[in-house]
Image: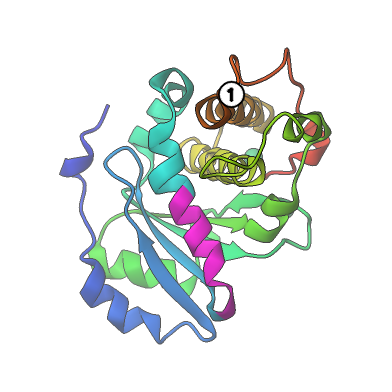
Amino acid sequence: MRNRSQKPRVKPPGVFSRLASAVCGRTQRLIQAGDALPLVVATYPRQNSWFASELSDALRLTFPALPNRITYSYGDALARVPSVVVADLRSSNSCTCLGHHHPTVIHSRLTRALQADTGGRIGEIDLAVGAIRKWNPLPLAGLAAACNDDGPESFEEIRFHAALLAVFLHELEHVAYPERPEAEVRMRSNSFFVDAVGELLGIEFGLASGMPGPLTVEHRHLALA
Ligand SMILES: [Zn+2]
Ligand SMILES: [Zn+2]
């Protein structure tokens, strides 16, 4: 496993101030979520700052709350991804996918500028944050009734943050292993999502095992690329 501290690090403030004004109608936010995850440069429409706030919460609060037995399946991919990843946050994708990884040949101007500035490898993905918020696989709907809203996080927030994390990690796995088949990558992110929701419900609402029995996430609803 590579030592993340040995990778080239971007110097955010200088690079950032020069790039921020170059991307019309959009703004950027840095999300630093500790050594396990890459530094994320979130770029999003100015009027939708909640896209970045929710991703930040998912990466900085939800991810560390999960035990190693759930996050370990992404250990190898996270060790291989670039130390900086640009995440293009949008409401939805016209193809209905919840996210994509972007091969180098279609990297945005922002990513290319960061790459030129730092000399390091930069990854790029997009996340359809609005669509991810609405995404609600049927088997989860019944669980909402078992959860009251007394906790700091509601059932909806837990589901949303787990889904954001699952899509984020799914796309990072594609960045780390571009040759890996979609079915394999999707199976891992589906399992992660189900396990994460179960664990977080257990933490928040004291449900003994989180999920009431086996849960099948319908793949056709989890449209990822
Ligand atoms: Zn797509
Ligand atoms: Zn995929």
Residue position marked by numbered label 1 in the rendering:
195
Apparent side of residue 140 relative to residue 55 in the rendered image (left or right): right
Q: Position of residue 95 (x, y in %)?
A: 78, 57
- Evaluate whether residue 124 shows in this view: no
Q: Position of residue 75 (x, y in %)?
A: 39, 27
Which residue is nearer to you in this view: 153 or 40? 153
Apparent side of residue 218 relative to residue 212 in the rendered image (left or right): right
Up-down relation of residue 225 to residue 191 (above or below):
below
Q: Residue at x 21, y 55 (%)?
A: 9
Q: Picture quarter containing residue 84?
A: bottom left
Q: Position of residue 46 (x, y in %)?
A: 53, 79
Mark 1: which amino acid?
Asp
Up-down relation of residue 64 to residue 16 (above or below):
above
Q: Quadrant of the N terminus?
A: top left
Which residue is nearer to you in this view: 41 or 101? 41
Q: Position of residue 115 (x, y in %)?
A: 33, 64
Apparent side of residue 130 relative to residue 17 in the rendered image (left or right): right
Q: Picture quarter containing residue 79?
A: top left
- Beta carbon at label 1 within 8 Å of ligand 2: no
Apparent side of residue 220 relative to residue 111 in the rendered image (left or right): right
Q: Residue at x 42, y 72 (%)?
A: 28
- Evaluate whether residue 113 shows in this view: yes
Q: Secondary structure at mark 1?
A: helix
Q: Residue at x 69, y 44 (%)?
A: 224
Q: Which residues are magenta?
A: 47-57
Which residue is nearer to you in this view: 137 or 218? 137
Residue farthest along the left direction in this orientation: 6
Which residue is nearer to you in this view: 212 or 176? 212
Asked if the stretch drawn in magenta spans residue 144, the answer is: no
